[in-house]
Image (cartoon, rainbow, N blue to C red):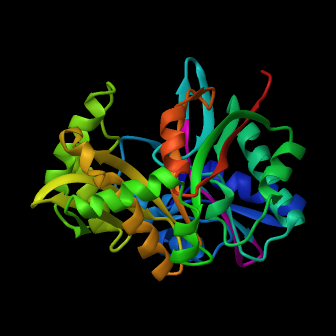
Amino acid sequence: MRTNGKSALADLGSVHAGTERGIRLVRFEINLASEWDEFVGRSKNGTLFHSRCFLSYHPPERFDDYSYMAYDGDRLVAVYPAAIQVRGAARWWCSHPGSTYGGPVFAADAGIEEVARVLECLTDLGKGAGFAGMEMRLSEQAFRTRPADEIEYALWRAGFELKAAELSTTVPLIEGYEASVAQFRQDTGRNVRKAVRSGVEVGWSDDFETYWGVLEQNLARHGAHPTHSLAEILRLRDLCPGKIRLALARVQGVPAAGVVVFVANAVCFHSFYIAQDYAQQQTRALSAVLDFLIRWGCEERFRYFNLGISTEQAGTVVNWGLFTFKQGFGGSGYLRTTYSLPWSA
């Protein structure tokens, strides 16, 4: 039920939270998108994946959006991109399933007390709405403007339990390109040099259509397919200008390997689709693409380059070969965690 453009439940949550902890919760509406995205851009842990510009590529019927904004007085202190998931007969309130990771986003100056108050209000709202529980998949520390574990601590304090611990590989760029290259494993450095000798040329490209053919063929070898269709990735590129880019390697003009980059925020960029034409594997074109991106990231003054997870099934299955390849570029493991809080009937 809606009243005056807001859900009745949102109003109930606002009154309940406001009277007890000084936090007012407001159900997200499309007219709040600009305020939401501006806040994410200056937050302590927000990324492209938390933004409404990114989430808006999903058709309205795909997810039952149940996102909230938290105000302390008139000051916006947090946003929570989330949706309702039906699991059997139960309804769960989850970090937005249309995003790589989610969880609440907090103001840059939010301290532990404010973080705890917002999370307490959200859990109270979830209980009052009759959900079976809440679940949040958080981003790695590399995506935060400064190291901060307040969210994890507040979740643990509120009774959330660790449900999944996936491990990604992140390359530090803080000390510049030469320092980053010095951290390459010896075989990785040889592969980059071999790519140069093989005539591999790497640059930015708008030819997503050709690359999607390489990507789909690559993933088919593993019984998988891209999360995004070609039409979806092109729509995302248009919705988020400059945030989604394709680095493509060619050998004699023929695409050999590539990486689709998502610029998560000013701190970290994220490789989302890594693929190569196995017929040209011996050119080591993929190594050349990653080297190109590390150089670019250093020039653009990013702190980190996230190469994505190499685990499956909530982190219990490890792709050791993929980990070994990524770590060759000087990468270290960073946790991407999922926290869950079920409520008894």
At x 47%, y 59%, the residue is 270
Q: Is residue 89 above or below residue 187?
A: above
At x 59%, y 74%, the residue is 39
Instruction: Describe residue 185's horizontal placement relative to residue 226 as left or right.
Output: right
User: Magenta stretch containing residue 191, yes or no?
Assistant: no
Instruction: Describe residue 60's horizontal placement relative to residue 23 as left or right.
Output: left
Q: Is residue 148 above or below residue 126?
A: below
At x 51%, y 70%, the residue is 32
Q: Nearer the viewer, residue 217 or 141?
A: 217
Residue 334, horizontal then vertical, whole percent: 66, 50
The quadrant the C terminus occupies is: top right
* Magenta segment boundaries in residue numbering: 72-84
Q: How many marks?
A: 0
User: Magenta stretch containing residue 75, yes or no?
Assistant: yes
Residue 224, horizontal then vertical, whole percent: 33, 29
Residue 266 can be seen in this image: no
Q: Nearer the viewer, residue 1 or 128?
A: 128
> Residue lying furthest top in this view?
88
Q: Is residue 78 above or below residue 301?
A: above
> Residue lying furthest left in this view?
253
Residue 341 can be seen in this image: yes
Q: Nearer the viewer, residue 164 or 218?
A: 218
Residue 317, horizontal then vertical, whole percent: 58, 26
Residue 19, horizontal then vertical, whole percent: 86, 61
Q: Nearer the viewer, residue 209 or 201?
A: 201
Q: Principal SS element in the magenta part?
A: strand
At x 87%, y 64%, the residue is 112
